[in-house]
Each structure stands twice: as structure tokens, then as C-alpha cells.
Image: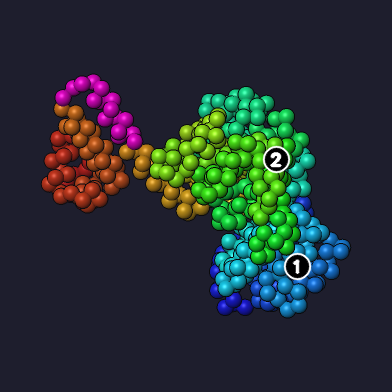
Amino acid sequence: MGQIAEEMNIPNTALPPAVGTFAEKIKPVWVVDDDRSIRWVFEKALTREGIPFKTFALAQDALDALVASEPQVLVSDIRMNGASGLELLQNVKQRFPALPVIIMTAYSDLESAVAAFQGGAFEYLPKPFDVDQAVDLIRRAMDESLREVDVEDANLSSPEILGQAASMQEVFRAIGRLAQSSATVMITGESGSGKELVARALHRHSPRAAKPFVAINTAAMPKDLLESELFGHERGAFTGAQAMRRGRFEQAEGGTLFLDEIGDMPAELQTRLLRVLSDGTFYRVGGHQPMRTNVRVIAATHQDLDARVREGLFREDLYHRLNVIRLRLPSLRERREDIPLLARHFLAKSARDLGVDPKRLSDAAMAYLVAHDFPGNVRQLENLCHWLTVMAPTQIIEVGDLPPEFRQQAASVVDADWLAALSSEVDRVLARNESGIMDELTRSFERTLIAKALAATGGRRIEAAKLLGIGRNTITRKIQELGLEKDSGPDVD
């Protein structure tokens, strides 16, 4: 078993299992594989993550169990003794169309995996797989499943958008103005800034709120699969298409379709999407009957679409169709004053999900977070707060409790901050339109550097010189020139 765990890349350090009510809110994940070692790997990984599960050696065993209960997510191998994973998939989809099914396959089974994907699988997982990647995929499938369950109550399924910064107040005002409109909206902003939350808010406050909100990441799948995913397909349209499948446009009928990462959409699909936006009709893959659609399209991207249009990577006519109204989301570093509010919210949310008491950031730790740039934006802060809820040893979180890699990133931010401060000081001095600023700034820099080195060594000049990488005579001369005699001791150790 140890060799299998090593091949599957199970981390040596594992998070403790989730406790409390979180696990009670979800149904078990079912894993079907006739290889006992693979079942063992999933058992260990899901136990570590606090995710309830059941394992089956045969597809027929899982089908028999479906009579009495239903999983949250089904994970199945494609080739097994007895019924295959594809047969299991077909049977499950007929009985539970919304159940996410993840198909596991060896690389040599890629064609079968694609057929499974087009036949309704949520995703395929190639073997050998990284366990963290597999767990992340299962969590995404669980989120999708829970969204399907809660689709009738959008207010409960969609988290609030929080923010007191002026830039976020502008976003809230824009949502208020746009919600009653059916105009196409383009949301721009960095990854993790909350573009899907804004799209959900636009839908929730619109006349279409009672109809479905359907989201798809257009960069997350190959173009052949994306076409079927968006427009659906007819039975027999390609190998493995054993049943007609409705695409996202049909699923969102009367409601809102959110196209995330639209800038990565393949050129051929850009053409098909333009046609839908132009005349409201489309064809399923393999179909000959035009389908009419009534959906509001909201698109989002983290890319510079103007640049992609200039480079010929994005159709200009589609760009103008999508870019009727543009709504830009600020990055988290542009609204640092919201970090304390968001951090407290995410810590409380993680505590509720895990059934534990909420933790609190010390003043020093909160100041440390506020100074951080958060390249992953709000999503990175949320993940950090969840990590702290599980891993921080005490109820009060100190700077030393933050993940080591996060502290290293923050140190890089500090380096950038002092250079930014230096740049601002240069601008200020230049604005006085005086000469000799090089000498002035150099003296200030040297004075600060030498004074700090002397303070660190208790005024011992030779030690300070070694720290600075300069000679003994040089530091003595500089101390005299800069008037730092009071900060230093005699010229001996």
C-alpha cells in the first residue's frame, strides 16, 4: 500500500478531518473501482478531508445501492470486471440526470473518456492521478451538485458580496442599475476577484431570478467538448453520444448564462456564439432543427480583450456584442480596507462549515494581511482563512501561525513596498525643482542604513561594517560625515 500511496502522491502531512455539521449536510461520495488499492487511496484521502464516502468493487453493487440511496458525487473507473464505467454512467444519468459523475481512466482510454464526457460525465480523471487534484475535482463536483439542489433558493446558494471600499460601492450601484436590464454585461477583473458572484447577484435581483442561473468556464475544456456543453447534441451525433443532451443554453432558458473566461474561447465557437447573440437561434451538435433561446448572457474575463482583438485572437464583432456594458471588479489590493471585513467573514464561515469555534486574527496578523498584495484576490484570502481555521494552533491567530509560503510572499511585498516608497519620495523631491537631490537622497539612504546596522550591533562599528559589507575605515568616515557618533561606540569591538 505504501508504494501505491507514493505513486499517487499522497502528501505526508494531511489536514485533520472536518468535524461537526459540515459532513452531515452532504451525502457520501461513491467510489467504484475493482482495484482494491485505488479504493484504499480514496478512502484515505476522503477520510483526511472529512468527506463521507462509500466504496464499491463492482458497478452492479453501486447500481443495487442506488435503489435505497443516492450519492453526492459518483467516481467510477471505466474498465472493471462486470459492467463498465460507461454502462454505469448511462444508467445513473437516466435515473439521476443532475448527479455529477467523474470517470477514471488510463491515458490509453482517452477516446473512451471523451465519449464519457460527452455522454454526461462531469469530468474525467486520468490515471495515475495526483490525490490532491482528485480531491479538488471531487469538491468541485460536490459544489456543482449542491448548486443543483439549491437552485430554487438563489439567496441561500449564493454568498454575499462584501465590501465597504468606494470602488466596491460603485460595483454595488452598477449591479442595482443593471439588474433590471436584459443587456449583455462584460465583467472584467483579475482571477479570484469575484466575477461569478457579481454575475449571480445580477441574476438574483433581475426579473429572471425565478429561472435558472447556469455557469460554465469556457477555458476549462477542449473545444469539441465545449461545443457540446454549450449547445447540446443529438443522439448519435458522434461516437459515445448514446442519448440526446441539452446544452447550457437550453438549461438556462428564460434565465441567465454566465460564460466565464470568455477570452479563451476557441475561434470556431466564437462564431457560433456570435450567431446565437445575433438572432437567438442555434443548432445542437448533429442537429438540423434550429433551437430558439431566451437567455441573458453575462461574460467575464481576466484578460485584456482589446489586446486580444488587436492580435486577432478574439472576434471584434463578438467583442462588441458582449461588451455592451462593462463592469470592472477591483483587485483586493485596490481595496485593502475591505480585508479585515472579508477575513472576519471567511473565518466565521469556515468555522460554521467545520462545526468549530471561530478563530480571530490578532492586530499584528491583521495588519500583516492588509499589507499583503493577494495576487489570488478574494479567493486566496478565503482559502487562507479556511486553512487557518483548520491549522492555526490557538483561537487567536498570530503572524507566526500564517502558512510559511504566505509569509515568504508577504516579505516580497514588503520589498516592493519600500521601493514604491522610495519612488514616491523621489517624486516629492523632484517636485521642489531643486538641484543636488542625488546627494540629499544618498545621504538619507546611507544614514538610515548605517544607523540601523549600528542599532543591530549595539553600536559596535566593526560588526556593523561586516553586516553592511563595507570596510572599517569607510564606516568610521561615514559616521563622522553623517553625524552618527552618538549612535556608535568606539572604533573597537
Using residue 434 as the reference point, say whether residue 394 is left or right of it: right
Residue type, numbered disc 1: Leu
Element at label 1: helix
Kindly identify the residue that appears in the image at 50 percent across and 48 percent down.
267
Q: Where is 243 relative to 255, above or below? A: below
Scheme of colours in the image: rainbow
Relative to 48, residue 153 above or below = above
Secondary structure found at label 2: strand
Magenta: main secondary structure equals helix
Please indicate whether residue 410 sits to the left or right of residue 168 in the image. left
User: What residue sits right under mark 2 in the picture?
Assistant: 292
Where is residue 11 shown, x and y percent of the image? 56, 66
Which residue is painted at 59% across and 68% down in the image?
110
Residue denoted by label 1: 88
Q: Which residues are magenta?
A: 420-435
The answer for how far apart the CA atoms under marks 1 and 2 are is 33 Å
Work out whether residue 228 or residue 153 is closer to the camera in this orientation and state it. Answer: 228
Q: Is residue 434 magenta?
A: yes
The quarter of the picture where the N terminus appears is: bottom right
Q: Residue at x 63, y 68 (%)?
A: 112
Q: Is residue 186 visible?
A: no
Q: Nearer the viewer, residue 157 or 312?
A: 312
